[in-house]
């Protein structure tokens, strides 16, 4: 059964090394200021790491697709929440701080 | 394996402890029934007190006390009655039966969800001893930060939220993994589609409520400055967070009720449902779209015009699948062989009252009109039409419908019909005048009003006594049926869904042998 | 290579499932649905953080000077290692390698302890400087017990970065930044502790020969929860420490 699929050690190790490398990469990139792209780059790298953890350590690649659908739908609705709040925040009249 | 004759889930083990530690979904459903109905009557008492005050303002209490009454009425009805009402009470009992399964996927998690509801409710009620809460069930900041009792109350709601999450989680896995052989997704009864769509909302939306309440508590306790304008926080952000859950929450309240209606209408018109797939997809569609509309509660709160326009537009869209369902139900009745039994009366009442509630929702979704109606009695009337005229009618109809299955007894049909008469007429007398009150300018959450609103308020209050009588009659019917009802057959109504093939009441394992499904759920041959 | 007896007859699947396989599938799916709820819960905090970083960018710039990215990076590596070892331990169970499985679970727990240890160090350093959440925020650059004679005449001090911070130059609602910091890392830390508890429980059950290739569902659940804790940190680290 695919649910009990045993991954070879090599796969786990490769993923782990890649994750460490990506961590080093994101720290290094953070030293350079890309202005408004800073957040985007950091989040993008984080997402790649998250995908690796999900697909291999959490076996999503070898599981029933419904588990992946579950995870992605969580992210999707989170993005919906963020997007609409951002539209509101971005389009409100510039206000003085309430402090 | 065959069961001992006469043995069923009710009598196979006795004693309070066997109930409190049960893993049987049917017993858990009954425990929820007792809890939810008890909370309903408590919440109802608060409602009666409110309407009594509004009959003659100033006669009973002063403003602060009234605000507390309305807070408890709202909190109890929302978190302890209507959200668990259909999924946790009726759903827990019928879902495995409808699917031909022996239980839900995770029975221990199921029991835990009941304890979460009870512990959360206890924590919330504790606030009564510490001065009470008067923020309204919506806990808007900054008032909720300044006033008394908020932390305990939101802690209670937080715990109750877990009850909802765990029920939803259980149902999603149950529907995916425990259907009887032969039951593909499009042979499931529409009640299952309804519970499934509801479960999706419960799982995705409630965690956001959890974090909102946690942040509110930290604001109160630690002064973090996230929602308090005095510290640089944004009260509108609180409302975004709060309504991101609470709008989908109202669909948690109505979707499973609509599932009940699909079952009642088909059984009592002996006709297959019109547009099965349309209703099934509409259920999921409503669940999905419900996440995109929360800002329609905030048109006048300070959110931007652009956001308001977007939310208004999408809210119109959510009316479409709802209307599709309503048209399909009516079409189901056409050329059916209608039996006006008490569950059917409640179902028909639902269609009428929910439609009024629904179209007034569209009126409120319209940005321009909402500016005038927001925070008036128009809104109060709208949501009572959908929640009471809709969900509560469906719950009552559902109780009468599944009563023989749950308890193996019949109830007094005459008195059940009487209850409908009082509830239906009482409901309209109470809440229709409130549309007029709101449209002519009476604000909500006020303990008094201008003299010109007096007669409509008094009519509304008289209506509230009528509904009260109706629900008390219904309670009497239930209790009398439990004590003295005649023995019920397996299938008193001639329904075609799987629960009617099980004993009344069912054995612990539900079915003697696992059913194999070959036909759809409503094939009456018409 | 196998070095333990097979507990294949020990676990009986629950009566409403058709088989152990059926139960495992359902249980795994159930855990995923639960993880979904965690994503939405933590996600709400991220949304709040990003909202305020747009509204008061100055407090986020100022505040992040107080966080040491080196400690954050070490913690990231530690959690990644722990994810690796818990995943391997499941493989060990699948291959009937009980001792290796236990060893890897213990490494996971040690990693968790290291993570919490570093967190503890970060928190106490902040408390020492009077940085508490919300209304308790009372920034004392030299610590409450040192007198101001340690500061130079400009009231400067060194933040963790070695950068000099003017006490007066901190924005008025800087406490909001630290409130987010404490709430987000605090809730995350709570989940780390819960995860460690779950893994410890699995370790004990493994020692008692309760798991084998046919049944290891609780370990699968605990591991998935642990991976989630790692996932949250993967996003939290850049958000707090790097941006």
Image (cartoon, rainbow, N blue to C red):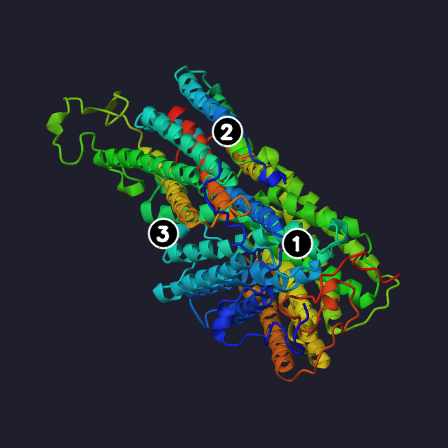
Q: Which mark is residue B146?
A: 3
10 Å crowding of disc 1: few (<14), some (14-19), many (20+) = many
Image quadrant occupied by the C terminus of chain B: bottom right
Tag nearer the camera, 3 or 1: 1
At horizontal 14% and vertical 22% (from top left) the residue drawn is: C153
User: How many labels sit on residues?
Assistant: 3
Provide residue C179's location: percent of width, then percent of height: 35, 38
Q: Name the residue under label 2.
A: A9
Can residue B460 be seen by looking at this rendering? yes
**Cα gap from disc 2 to disc 3, whole angstroms:** 57 Å
- B228 to C153, vertically: above or below: below
Image quadrant where residue B494 sits? bottom right
- A83 to B198, vertically: above or below: above
CB contact under 8 Å: marks 3 and 1: no
Residue in the foreground of this view, choosing between B162 and A33: B162
Image quadrant occupied by the N terminus of chain B: bottom right
Q: Mark 1 points at which residue?
A: B178
Residue in the foreground of this view, choosing between B95 and B438: B95
Considering the numbered disc 3 on the image, is that residue within a helix, a strand or a loop? Answer: helix
Residue in the foreground of this view, choosing between B118 and B173: B173
Q: Mark 3 or mark 1: which comes first in sequence?
A: 3
A32 horizontally vs B331: left or right: left
Provide residue B370's location: percent of width, then percent of height: 61, 48
């Amino acid at each position: 059964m695919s649910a009990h699929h045993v991954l070879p050690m090599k796969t786990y190790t490769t993923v782990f090394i890649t994750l460490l490398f990506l961590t080093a990469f994101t720290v290094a990139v953070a030293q350079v200021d890309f202005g408004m792209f800073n957040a985007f780059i950091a989040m993008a790298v984080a997402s790649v790491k998250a995908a690796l953890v999900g697909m291999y350590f959490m076996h999503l690649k070898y599981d029933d697709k419904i588990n992946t659908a579950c995870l992605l739908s969580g992210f999707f609705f989170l993005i919906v929440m963020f997007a609409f709040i951002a539209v509101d925040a971005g389009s409100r009249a510039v206000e003085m701080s309430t402090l | 394996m065959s069961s001992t004759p006469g043995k069923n889930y009710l009598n196979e083990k006795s004693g309070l402890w066997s109930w409190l530690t049960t893993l049987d979904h049917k017993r858990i459903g009954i425990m929820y029934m007792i809890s939810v109905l008890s909370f309903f009557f408590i919440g109802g008492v608060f409602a009666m007190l409110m309407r009594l005050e509004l009959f003659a303002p100033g006669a009973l209490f002063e403003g602060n006390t009234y605000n507390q009454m309305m807070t408890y009425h709202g909190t109890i009805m929302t978190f302890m009655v209507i959200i668990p009402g259909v999924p946790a009470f009726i759903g827990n009992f019928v879902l495995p039966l409808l699917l031909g399964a022996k239980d839900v996927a995770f029975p221990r998690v199921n029991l835990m969800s009941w304890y979460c509801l009870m512990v959360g409710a206890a924590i919330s009620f504790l606030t009564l001893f510490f001065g009470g809460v008067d923020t309204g069930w919506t806990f808007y900041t900054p008032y909720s930060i300044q006033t008394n009792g908020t932390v305990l109350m939101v802690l209670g709601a937080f715990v109750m939220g877990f009850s909802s999450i765990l029920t939803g989680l259980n149902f999603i896995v149950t529907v995916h993994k425990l259907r009887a052989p032969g039951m593909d997704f499009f042979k499931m009864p529409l009640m299952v589609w309804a519970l499934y769509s509801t479960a999706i909302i419960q799982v995705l939306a409630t965690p956001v409520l959890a974090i909102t309440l946690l942040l509110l508590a930290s604001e109160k306790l630690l002064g973090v400055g996230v929602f308090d304008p005095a510290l640089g926080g944004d009260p509108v952000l609180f409302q975004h967070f709060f309504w991101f859950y609470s709008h989908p929450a109202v669909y948690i309240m109505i979707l499973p009720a609509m599932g009940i209606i699909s079952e009642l209408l088909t059984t009592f018109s002996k006709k297959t449902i019109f547009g099965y797939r349309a209703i099934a997809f509409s259920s999921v569609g409503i669940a999905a779209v419900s996440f995109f509309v929360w800002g329609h509660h905030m048109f006048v709160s300070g959110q931007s015009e652009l956001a308001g326009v977007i939310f208004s537009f999408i809210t119109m869209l959510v009316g479409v699948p709802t209307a599709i369902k309503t048209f399909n139900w009516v079409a189901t009745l056409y050329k059916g062989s209608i039996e006006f039994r008490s569950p059917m009366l409640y179902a028909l009442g639902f269609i009428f009252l929910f439609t009024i509630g629904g179209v007034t929702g569209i009126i409120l979704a319209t940005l321009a009109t909402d500016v005038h109606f927001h925070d008036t009695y128009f809104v109060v009337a709208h949501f009572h039409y959908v929640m009471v005229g809709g969900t509560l009618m469906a719950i009552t109809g559902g109780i009468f419908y599944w009563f023989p299955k749950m308890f193996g007894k019949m109830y007094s049909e005459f008195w059940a019909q009487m209850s409908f008469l009082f509830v239906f007429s009482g409901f309209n007398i109470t809440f229709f005048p409130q549309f007029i009150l709101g449209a002519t300018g009476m604000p909500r959450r006020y303990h008094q009003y201008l003299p010109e609103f007096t007669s409509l308020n008094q009519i509304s209050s008289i209506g509230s006594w009528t509904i009260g009588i109706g629900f008390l009659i219904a309670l009497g019917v239930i209790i009398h049926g439990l004590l003295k009802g005649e023995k019920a057959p397996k299938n008193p109504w001639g329904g075609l869904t799987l629960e009617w093939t099980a004993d009344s009441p069912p054995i612990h394992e539900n079915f003697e042998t696992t059913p194999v499904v070959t036909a759809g759920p409503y094939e009456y041959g018409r | 290579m196998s070095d333990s007896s097979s507990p294949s007859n020990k676990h009986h699947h629950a009566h409403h499932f058709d088989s152990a396989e059926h139960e495992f599938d359902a249980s795994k799916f159930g855990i995923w649905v639960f993880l979904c709820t965690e994503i939405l819960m933590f996600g709400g905090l991220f949304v709040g953080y990003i909202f305020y970083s747009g509204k008061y960018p100055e407090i986020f710039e100022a505040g992040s000077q107080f966080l040491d990215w080196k400690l954050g990076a070490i913690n990231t590596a530690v959690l990644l290692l722990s994810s690796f070892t818990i995943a391997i331990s499941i493989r060990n169970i699948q291959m009937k390698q009980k001792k290796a499985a236990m060893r890897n679970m213990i490494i996971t727990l040690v990693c968790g302890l290291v993570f919490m240890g570093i967190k503890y160090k970060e928190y106490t350093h902040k408390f020492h400087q009077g940085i508490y959440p919300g209304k308790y925020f009372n920034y004392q650059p030299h610590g409450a017990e040192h007198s101001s004679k340690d500061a130079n005449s400009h009231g400067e001090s060194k933040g963790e970065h070695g950068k000099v911070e003017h006490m007066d130059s901190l924005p008025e609602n800087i406490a909001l930044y630290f409130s987010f910091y404490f709430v987000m890392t605090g809730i995350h830390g709570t989940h780390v502790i819960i995860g460690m508890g779950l893994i410890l429980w699995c370790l004990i059950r493994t020692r008692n020969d309760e798991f084998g290739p046919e049944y290891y569902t609780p370990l699968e659940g605990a591991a998935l929860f642990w991976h989630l804790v790692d996932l949250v940190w993967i996003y939290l680290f850049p958000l707090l420490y790097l941006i």
